[in-house]
Image (tube, grey):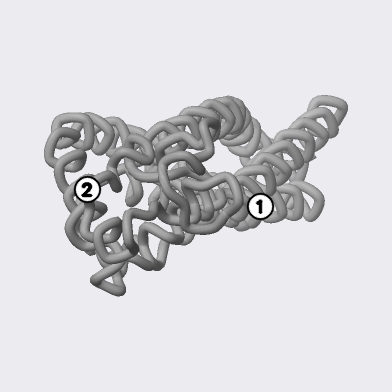
Amino acid sequence: MALFALLKILIFLFNSIIFFGGLGLLAIGLCLKIDGSSFTDFLGATVSPFTQLVVIRYLCIIIGSILMFLGILGCWGAIRENKSLLLLFFIIILIVFLIKMASAMIILVFSSIANALFTHIDSWAVGTLRESYGKEENITKMWNTTMMELNCCGFHNYTDFSGSKYQNLSGGHYPAFCCKENLPCRESGIANDKEGCLHKLKESLENNGKLIGGVGLGILVFEVAAMVVSMILFFKIDDISYD
């Protein structure tokens, strides 16, 4: 009986950690400051750093929500000593565990593909700023959203707009996102501390990636422990009933 009580406490503890870990992932996903709709509407299936951030955001939201549900299910099954709930918990958490492993591999492959296509992406991004920004509504909206959300200017820096169609149409001015006073300006009014969106995006991915990776690794450990304890508890319920 003492062992059975200990197992119930352990699975309750593990599932509480899984629940709050899922809550943490959900919060990270909701707090990632990026407007995915404007990117996906224009880029479609194009593999780019923008779509990587969108994928990571929604993975965090989905996985976090599932983990919160699992935490509640596991705790409820242990408290009620319900074998069906414990078995359902084990099956679902095993599926989630396998999906997370597969997702990690996909993200690694996705990142390597993005790196391999960086030259193409660089050319495309700078080309849209020089030739289409200020003329085509979708592209202008996409870049405005990017520069506003990431507090950046251009893809590399403000020089991406030098000699661009936008500069020619605006009388030699740069977009307000690049300027000290948040108004279209000439080169003398450029904010020196305003970095390019590529740097900001990499910084955001790196910082969020470390946080997500740390939370995810911790959750994986407790998921495995919870699966083991849930199965021991599953079989111990029969032993207790026979006693």
Q: Marks 2 and 1, how far apart in space?
A: 52 Å
Residue for point 17% across, 58% down: 131
Image spot of residue 43 (x, y percent): 24, 61
Q: Residues within 10 Å of mark 1 (few under 14, many from 20)?
A: many
Q: Which amino acid type is shown beneath numbered disc 2? A: Gly
Q: Residues within 10 Å of mark 2 (few under 14, many from 20)?
A: few
Residue for point 15% across, 30% down: 116
Q: Is residue 91 visible?
A: no
Relative to residue 42, is residue 183 depicted above or below?
above
The residue under label 2 is 163
Q: Which mark sits nearer the N-terminus, 2 or 1?
A: 1
Mark in the foreground, 2 or 1: 2
Which image quarter holds the N terminus? Answer: top right
- In the figure, residue 101 lies in which quadrant? top left
Relative to residue 3, is residue 198 depicted above or below?
below
Q: Which mark is residue 68?
A: 1
Q: Is residue 73 visible?
A: yes
